[in-house]
Amino acid sequence: MTEIILSPEPRLLGKSGMLVSPIAWGMWRFANDDDVRAAREGVEAAFEAGIILFDTADIYGADAPGGFGAAEALLGRVFAEAPELRDRMVLASKGGIRLGVPYDSSPEYLVQAVDASLKRLGTDRIDLWQIHRPDVLAHPAEIAATLEELVLQGKIVSVGVSNYTPAQTAVLKSYLNIPLASTQPEFSPLATAPLSDGTLDRAMKYGLAVLAWSPLGQGRLGGDDAADDRTTAVRAALDAHAAKYGVSRSAVAYAWIMAHPSKPIPIVGSQNPARIREAADAFKVRFERAEWYAILEASLGERLP
């Protein structure tokens, strides 16, 4: 029976023309502005794991001492200390969330958000800039025109969306005269909606890269604490496959995501250098179809018809 084999080789980020790694590193918890050394260790651990796609956002760190923008500012301090690291990565960020609003994709705010991110990061461009969450009060034609102007100015290289529905993605794409490079849904063995709501199907139709956030189910798949029956069942299914290849449960979860034909890119969220490096073990994992579906059935809590 044919096995699903994963490749660690770089692939195109949608139709952006940029090559990225099959795994990304995310900076949701990357916000301790006092520890540039630890921050740099995390960045370098990601490179050691073969990761060149780095995903941050302006709101990351809003609940940390540094406040809104803290994660970008910390990465900017890393770049100031080691400028060569910036040139080795494809840098992605997000904007469009305003504390207390909560969403703003007006042309004025999108421009302000990109400019503020560039200043915090200390860089002249963001390789992939994504609207973090949809603002239903913003017309997609105005959003598209603003994104195109930002690309024309060279502030951003390519554009994507995060947490958009398939319909919202399609409408924005229809107004864009530049490629929409990516979509970023929550996707994991515990968050399987993209398999059935059209997100992954539309991504394949339009040639979008899929960046899967929270690939460990918001951390529930990474630990062994008390959990509900569904999480426990998925952990057991992942563990059974992990034992076959001598890898961690997390590595199998990443591999399970990447096995889909839309080639989703899991965004590793750990800030622990050892666990970041461990993500590369995902490429040791193979799946027969029955093995992949067994994990899905554990998540659904029922046998597929």
Image: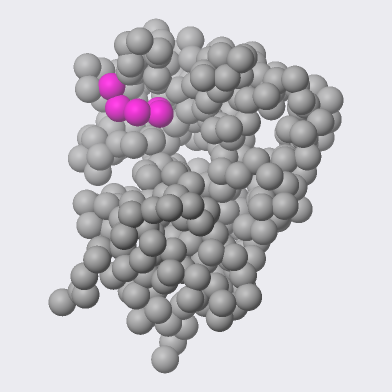
Q: Which residue is drawn at 38% across and 36% down?
A: 162
- Per the rendered image, the range of residues in magenta is 131-135
Residue 25: image location, x then y, percent:
60, 44
Residue at the image point whose x is 33% and y is 21% from the top: 143
Specify whether residue 127 is in view: no
Residue 108, how many percent across, how many down? 39, 8
99, above or below 212, in the image: above
How is the rendered protein coloured?
one colour
In this rendering, position of residue 84 left or right of residue 250: right
Residue 210 x/y as whole percent? 42, 50
> Which quadrant holds residue 233?
bottom left
Quarter in which the N terminus is drawn: bottom left
Residue 188 position, x and y percent, is 40, 54
Residue at the (34%, 75%) spot, across then down: 294
Residue 133 is covered by the magenta coloring: yes
Residue 38 picture quarter: top right
**Which of 220/83 is in front?**
220
- Give the camera-side residue of 297 and 60: 297
Residue 224 is left or right of residue 97, and the answer is: right
